[in-house]
């Protein structure tokens, strides 16, 4: 059975919505390598609409700057959960139709490698968490206090996780791997 791995980047004060404003120089060295390794270890990506639209607008133009990472982002199969999109055929994507919980459960049962959930904290993330469909959470805790912005999992009831690994990077970023208790 495939695993769903949800990865997110979060500041010390829980901000997730504007990494372009604070991630900057931290995206280098070990962090870039860990992200590269994770992307190349999975067979597909899972998106909500907002993250999908944001990424689909920029990644096709970044192959020169980001090399094989951008090529992988552009060519790996993507599954997009949305109640408003009518189609998601661009950027090697397939629209998840029908009940998202049922369809993601079916995706996990398909043959192949793991699936990386991109974008953390939105409606799809909350739905997957409520239905316990994510097998592993990887939060990159960055040493930044953003002061404002969208928070991680607003509106979710208390949910307990078990820490299974910590990856301390040389730039102060912590990779925190959790599973549900």
Image: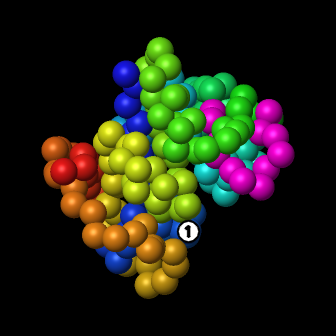
Q: Name above or below for residue 90 compared with residue 111.
A: below
Q: Element under label 1? A: loop
Q: Residue at x 34, y 63 (%)?
A: 142
Q: What segment carries the magenta color? A: 78-89
Q: Nearer the viewer, residue 111 or 19?
A: 111
The location of residue 108, given as percent across then percent down, is 45, 28
From where the camera sits, is residue 39 visible?
A: no
Residue 82 is covered by the magenta coloring: yes
Q: Nearer the viewer, residue 21 or 107?
A: 107
The location of residue 20, given as percent across then percent down, is 57, 63
Image position of 103 (left or right of 125):
right
Q: Which colouring convention does the figure follow?
A: rainbow
Q: Residue furthest top?
A: 111
Q: Name above or below for residue 124 compared with residue 43.
A: below
Quadrant of the frame with the N terminus = top left
Q: Residue furthest right?
A: 86
Q: Residue at x 63, y 27 (%)?
A: 77
Magenta part, dominant SS: loop
Q: Residue at x 63, y 35 (%)?
A: 79
Residue 80 is covered by the magenta coloring: yes
Q: Name above or below for residue 114 compared with residue 152.
A: above
Residue, disc 1: 18
Q: Residues within 10 Å of mark 1 (few under 14, many from 20)?
A: some
């Amino acid at each position: 059975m495939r695993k769903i791995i949800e990865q997110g980047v979060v500041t010390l004060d829980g901000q997730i919505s504007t990494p372009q404003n604070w991630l900057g120089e931290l995206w280098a060295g070990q962090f870039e390598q860990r992200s590269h390794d994770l992307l190349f270890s999975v067979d597909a990506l899972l998106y909500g609409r907002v993250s999908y639209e944001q990424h689909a607008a920029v990644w096709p133009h970044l192959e020169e700057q980001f090399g094989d990472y951008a090529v992988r982002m552009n060519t790996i199969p993507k599954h997009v959960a949305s109640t408003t999109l009518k189609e998601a055929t661009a950027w090697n994507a397939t629209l998840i139709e029908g009940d998202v919980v049922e369809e993601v459960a079916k995706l996990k049962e398909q043959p192949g490698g793991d699936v990386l959930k991109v974008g953390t904290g939105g409606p799809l993330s909350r739905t997957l968490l409520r239905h316990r469909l994510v097998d592993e959470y990887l939060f990159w805790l960055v040493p930044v206090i953003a002061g404002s912005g969208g928070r991680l999992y607003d509106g979710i009831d208390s949910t307990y996780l078990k820490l299974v690994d910590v990856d301390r990077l040389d730039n102060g970023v912590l990779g925190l791997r959790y599973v549900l208790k």
